[in-house]
Image: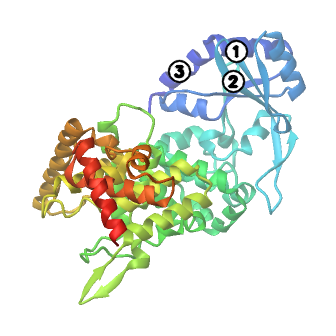
Amino acid sequence: MPTLAQSMEALRAIAASAPVAALASAFSERGHEFALVGGPVRDALLGRPVTDLDFTTSARPGETREILDTLGQSVWDVGRDFGTIAARVHGEDVEITTYRAETYRDDSRKPEVSYGDTIEGDLVRRDFTINALALMLPEMRLVDVGAASASGAGGIEDLLAGRIRTPGPPEASFTDDPLRMLRAARFASQLGFEVDAETRDAMVRFADRLDIVSAERVRDELVKLLSADDPVPGIRLLVDTGLADRFLPELTALVATQDDHGRHKDVYEHSLTVLRQAIDLEKARDHDPSPDIVLRIAALLHDIGKPVTRRFERGNVTFHHHDVVGAKLARRRLRELRFDNGTVKRAARLVELHLRFFGYSDQQWTDSAVRRYVRDAGDELQRLHVLTRADVTTRNRRKAERLEHAYDDIERRISELAEAEELAAVRPELDGERIMAILGVPPGPLVGRAYKYLLEVRLDEGPIGEEAAEERLRAWWVRQEES
């Protein structure tokens, strides 16, 4: 963490920027308090990049809109009922929210909003002390509401200690808004902080409150957690507190499931290792800075079929078909969490295919088998490369090296075949129209069977040319008529 002097310099640079200076001046001239609040203050104090600008003010929403209109910028409502107005000021999108005081019903995480009168009252209702910080503008006064609490420890002290703690009693905070418990896990991963004991205990006691939160909001927090450079600390917190049981019970079920070699570590630990290794490989291979959420979901869930397929056979533990079963479980769970269809389909397909490679190192595949591997992976081939490599967590160095060399070999062969045969677009030499013309048949299931036959020929033998494909088709047709 930078020194306080360095942090204040970063805050002064933000305050001096064109959009912030214009806003601070406009609200001050109208006699309203105005402050940069929450995440931007926290990140500036930590020396992290500040990407979003969030402000709070004593002005009511109507007054805020009037002030923003005088700046000649585009203005729009984000959540008028919650007192939030957005605008584009000097090229920056900003959100400005009236001081709030909120009350919650037991059966809902949506607050009944009333407007507050003080910055301290607004800050104390926020999720964690590290986010309950405000920089009053233009006077550059830092407000740390927690420092005036009974404990005397505020957001600044918690930032220095790397601690996540609620401004007030955690049971009240989590009862009011249970989503804050997932946010604690996310910040634990994003910031590398520890959740303090009292807050963690409250997460255990109030885990069932998460049931009132919509699946969409839970999904969004899970995606933000998985987007962290290292999501594992947050995932551990979700599992250890029982929160994961409320929305991803398949993950918790991995904890007590031994792997197929009876090693001391469980499948859960293996899955977390695979997730970390997949992220490392993702960063090494992909120049896109945005996290690959599909890959990370597949890495985390790739073995969730093991608990329900575990069998004891002749003193050994087996998990036959856990890939197929796991794909079905992943598909169902991701749909319940309201992931989009594309994410569901791609992640489930990766789970289904994650075992396909193993065995290649024992007996090298034919070109036909390599073509089928590529065909089955489709658009997910590059992700499957990463997932399969990440799935090697053995402590046996010789075995790990053998698997690595085997996958190097299969990627080389895929590349060579792709260059020679346009492997990514494997299809028969004859399409449906040509099949119907050659056989003199109308559209129907027969055409589909003929196409499938020619595709199998293409996969087995590679390109054979249109003339040879027509000969094969006619011979196949004779066999169909004879049967």
Q: Amino acid at mark 3?
A: Ala
Tell me the kind of residue under disc 2.
Answer: Val
Mark 3, residue position: 10
Left or right, 281 with respect to 56, comes to left
Residue type at mark 1?
Val
Q: How many marks?
A: 3
Coordinates of residue 174 in the picture (x, y in percent): 69, 57
Q: Earlier in the sequence, mark 3 or mark 1?
A: 3
Q: CA distance from mark 2 to mark 1?
A: 7 Å
Q: Secondary structure at mark 2?
A: strand
According to the picture, the residue beneath numbered tag 2 turns out to be 94
The C terminus lies in which quarter of the figure? bottom left
Contact check, label 2 and label 1, Cβ < 8 Å: yes
In this rendered view, identify the residue nearer to me: 74 or 25. 74
Q: CA distance from mark 3 to mark 1?
A: 20 Å
Residue 56 appears in which quarter of the rendering? top right
Residue beneath disc 1:
89
